[in-house]
Amino acid sequence: MHPKSYVALFAMIDQTFNYHYSPKIKEIAGYFDTMILQTKGFKYFENQYLLNTLILSLNVKNSKDENVNIQFVRTDGKYTLIDFWFRGCIGCLNEMKEIKDKYFANIEKKVRLISICTDVLEVVPESIKVLRKLNIPWENYWDYDASSFMKYTNIYVYPSNLLLNNFGYVIAKDLDIRNIDLLFK
């Protein structure tokens, strides 16, 4: 790879978009020339896909359509796993059930788990029914059309999640939930 190659930059961006974030991407970006890393294209890519984005708080809605401000800086040392879903996403619902059944009891002392539904306002009553049926024990909020969250990153794939450290920095995106308890042993 030539360090001043825009073709290599766009190939990397394309691979990240098509195949989820990989920790290798940050390493690969380090091989690019400083000039490339200062372009608008790379800055946009970095803001959308790379880690270390700081999210101090997020304005969302609760099940009664009331405004809630979630704070992500934690004095108790807990990390925060934000799980994004929508009512029609079978994979999302299966993943939430799997988290509840297999992992929640093992990680709840170390991780604050939050589900954020990105459905539109009109289907919130149906989303609430889904949550009740699944008997989800963690915090649940709504971010209609992911509008509040879009200032931090775009969500292109569902199910989708972010892991934030106790300082509010994104340290992982789209974790394979089957490995979540390995992070906190």
Image (cartoon, grey):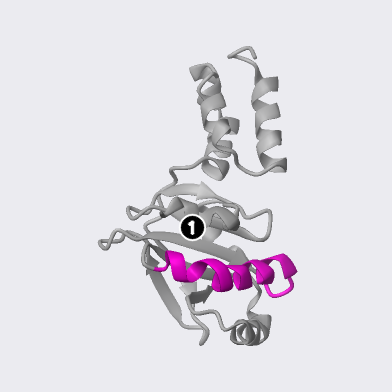
* Quarter of the N terminus within the rendering: top right
**Residue at screen point 44% across, 64% down:** 107
Pick the residue in front: 144 or 130.
130
Query: Which stretch did the figure color magenta?
Result: 86-108
* Quarter of the C terminus within the rendering: bottom left
Pick the residue in front: 8 or 137.
137
- Disc 1 residue type (three-letter): Asp
Residue 20 in the figure: left or right of residue 153 = right
Q: Which residue is mark 1?
A: 181
Query: Can the viewer see residue 109?
Result: yes
**Residue at screen point 43% across, 43% down:** 52
Pick the residue in front: 98 or 81.
98
Q: Position of residue 92 (x, y in %)?
A: 67, 67
Question: What count of labels does the image hold?
Answer: 1
Q: Position of residue 179 (x, y in %)?
A: 55, 53
Residue 6 in the figure: left or right of residue 152 = right
Q: Position of residue 112 (x, y in %)?
A: 41, 66
* Main secondary structure found in the magenta portion: helix
Q: Secondary structure at mark 1?
A: helix
